[in-house]
Image (cartoon, rainbow, N blue to C red):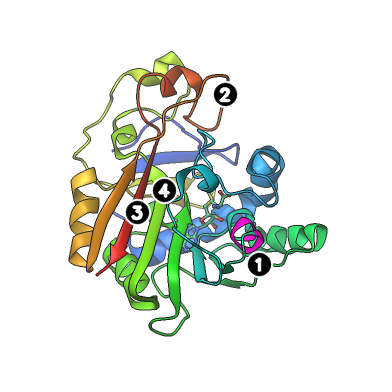
Amino acid sequence: MEQAVQTHWPHPPVTAHRRSVSEEESRLANGADWDRYADEYQATHGGYLGDVGFLWGPEGLTEAEARMLGEVRDRDVLEVGSGAGQCSRWVRSQGGRAVGLDLSHRQLQHSLRIDDATGLDVPSVRGTATHLPFADDSFDVVFSSFGALQFVADIDRAVAETARVLRPGGRFAFSITHPTRWMFPDDPTEDGLTATQSYWDRTPYVEVDDETGATSYAEHHRTLGDWVGLLAGAGFRLTTLLEPEWPEGNERLWGGWSRVRGALTPGTAIFGADLS
Ligand SMILES: C[S@@+](CC[C@H](N)C(=O)[O-])C[C@H]1O[C@@H](n2cnc3c(N)ncnc32)[C@H](O)[C@@H]1O
């Protein structure tokens, strides 16, 4: 199915489709997309994120408030989809040994820039969530704040990789776009409050570059029930699901997130699970 042009950020003309897309196609498209988008993303959101700041999503819930990771001091911590490393830098400021992994070279260059500016370095590696370049049992905590999970096709593999690199009893916490948002257009105004597609339709959202015909972006959807099954199937015990409310006084617009929509329906889901 094709739709009128929809852009998740201002970029060359694309056409949006709903169709299946492989893990390799998703990775190649999204890596290039984040390379193109990184400068604008950091310019627009970097101040809100904070160079040494850990936000779980546009609502502004911080890890200092949510405590999804548990104790991080003296713990080995991996951030998947670390971007410019803001969250990992906060973990480091709390005494945790955080390292970052991200698909985008340009995002990692921003991470280095902020390392230099703050004097708080986040050792980071370029890679993908489905092939973590770490030995088994390397980390006490793996987390992702709107990082890779909604960008990968092979989510079973990404969750299995997380379980592999975690030590027994380790903690996995991640935020994603709340699955119920899949039903609505990515529009922060009241126009975005009418459900236009099925919550249960897992067909990925794919953008194709009008000039080159190449896949330029891919996003994947899993229902809440899918996530429960994925985590249990990989040996995790789900302990927490946070659905932060839109706070009083937050007037920020971020993609489809806004006060208008946040007052009525959740935009972010934050899962916390322990490896059995
Ligand atoms: C919305 S940003 C979140 C980054 C950071 N947590 C923040 O709040 O700015 C998503 C990040 O996930 C990365 N990403 C996308 N697909 C990935 C994958 N398959 N493996 C690792 N990182 C990925 C992107 O490059 C991007 O830096």
Which mark's residue is nearer the viewer, 2 or 3? 3
Residue type pointed to by label 3: Gly
Check disc 3 and report its element: helix, strand or loop.
strand
Alpha carbons under labels 4 and 1: distance apart: 20 Å
Residue type pointed to by label 1: Val
Residue 194 in the image, given as x and y percentages of width and height: 31, 18
One can see residue 214 in this view? no
Residue type pointed to by label 4: Ser
Q: Which residue is located at x 54 percent, y 43 percent?
A: 62
Alpha carbons under labels 4 and 3: distance apart: 9 Å
**First in sequence: mark 4 vs mark 2:** 4
At label 3, counting other C-alpha atoms closer than 10 Å, the crowd grade (few under 14, some 14-19, many 20 or more) is many
Residue 195 in the image, given as x and y percentages of width and height: 28, 23
Viewer-closest of 10 and 120: 120
In screen coordinates, is 28 left or right of 273? Answer: right
Q: Which mark is residue 243?
A: none
- Label 4 close to label 1 by CB (< 8 Å): no
**First in sequence: mark 2 vs mark 3:** 2
Q: Which residue is located at x 22 percent, y 35 percent?
A: 199
Q: Residue 272 carries which label?
A: 3
Q: Mark 1 points at which residue?
A: 122
Viewer-closest of 103 and 178: 178
Q: Name the residue under label 4.
A: 175
Alpha carbons under labels 3 and 1: distance apart: 23 Å
In screen coordinates, is 159 left or right of 33? Answer: left
Check disc 1 and report its element: helix, strand or loop.
loop
One can see residue 175 in this view? yes
